Image (cartoon, rainbow, N blue to C red):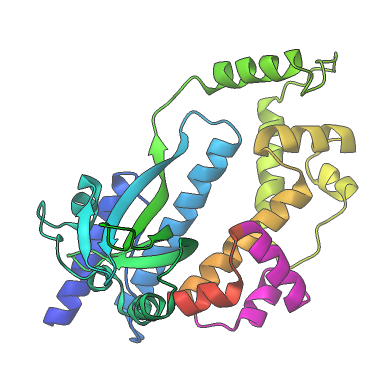
Amino acid sequence: MDSPENKKRLEDIYNQLVHIANGNFSYQIERTDKNDALEALTFLVNSTTEELRDAFLHQGFIKMPNSYEMVVQLYFELDGKGQIIKTNPTVDTLLHYKEGALIGRPFVELLDKSHQKGWKKLLNSAPKDRIWELTLRLTFTERSGLQLSSHCHVIYFPEQEDKKGTFKVTSFDLVKKEETNQGFLQKKLKQQLQAHGLLPKPQKTDTHILRAVDLENLRKAKQHIMDNLDMPLPSIKELAHFCNTNEYKFKKGFKELFGMTAFQFQKHERLRKAHILIEHSNKTILAIAKTVGFKKGNHFAREFKKRYGYSPSVLRRLSK
């Protein structure tokens, strides 16, 4: 445990926890092939980061006080050979470099080793006579050793007259924002859409106030679903009985509290858990699919890509 390597691994874990404490859930610790307590702790910290990230995103979805907003984190302008011409100040902050230290350096040096080969191949094989763009997931390595994985949009502009060919690489991410008056903004937008006939006029509906006991029972139902993702979803009648209520109140109360139906919630949690297992475990994708309740691999792959925009095999390849 006192070896320099293990001290470095403990330092990475400490740095990751500091980022979590500051509300930044973008960083990950690079995994090793060791099978010891520190590697188990690394897996736990990475998984917890993913859990917290999805939890805050879900809270924003159901209009909780704190939510996420989409912001540009990293911006790079590269020359035709992939060397950095300019960046935004956030790059230096997130990757822990001194201001201006990255100018003139190859962009590929900032990437995790697992992504360097793919980036070099992109530079060599991409057309240079026309504008093209693509979105891909890249993993950056900051100076302390933590990994910053993010979806990046790459645009290439070819050489024109006195301008040489350039790449624009932009990374977007989700960050926690402070409390805002979301209800007022949503109400105003809804009224405007209704005024233009883009949404139906409001109709009188039965009001339903969730009592404390209802909240507790619905949370138990939610936990029951999460603890049994590999099992078929119980019928609404069974779930309502589990919550000591009737089917109508259960369906209305569950969607009101969690922002989605019980069926949607189960699929959401299945895919979220599968994403974590693919990225942080060595189980086969088919085994993971069955672990989270998908009987057929092709059905799992289709639903996974529909939610995340990339296939399970692509995530596994980029996670190694």
Residue at image point 38% right, 63% down: 158
Residue at image point 40% right, 71% down: 128
The image quarter containing residue 312 is: bottom right
Q: Position of residue 256 (x, y in %)?
A: 71, 32
Residue 292 inside the magenta-drawn segment: yes
Report the quarter where the C terminus lies. Answer: bottom left
185 on left or right of 14: right
Q: Position of residue 180 (x, y in %)?
A: 45, 23
Residue 231, relative to residue 249: is it above or below? below
Residue 180, relative to residue 147: is it above or below? above
Q: Nearer the viewer, residue 129 or 31?
A: 129
Q: Position of residue 181 (x, y in %)?
A: 49, 19
Q: Nearer the viewer, residue 184 or 20?
A: 184
21 on left or right of 132: left
Bounds of the magenta segment = 282-307
Count the marks.
Answer: 0
Q: Is residue 90 visible?
A: yes
Q: Is residue 20 visible?
A: no
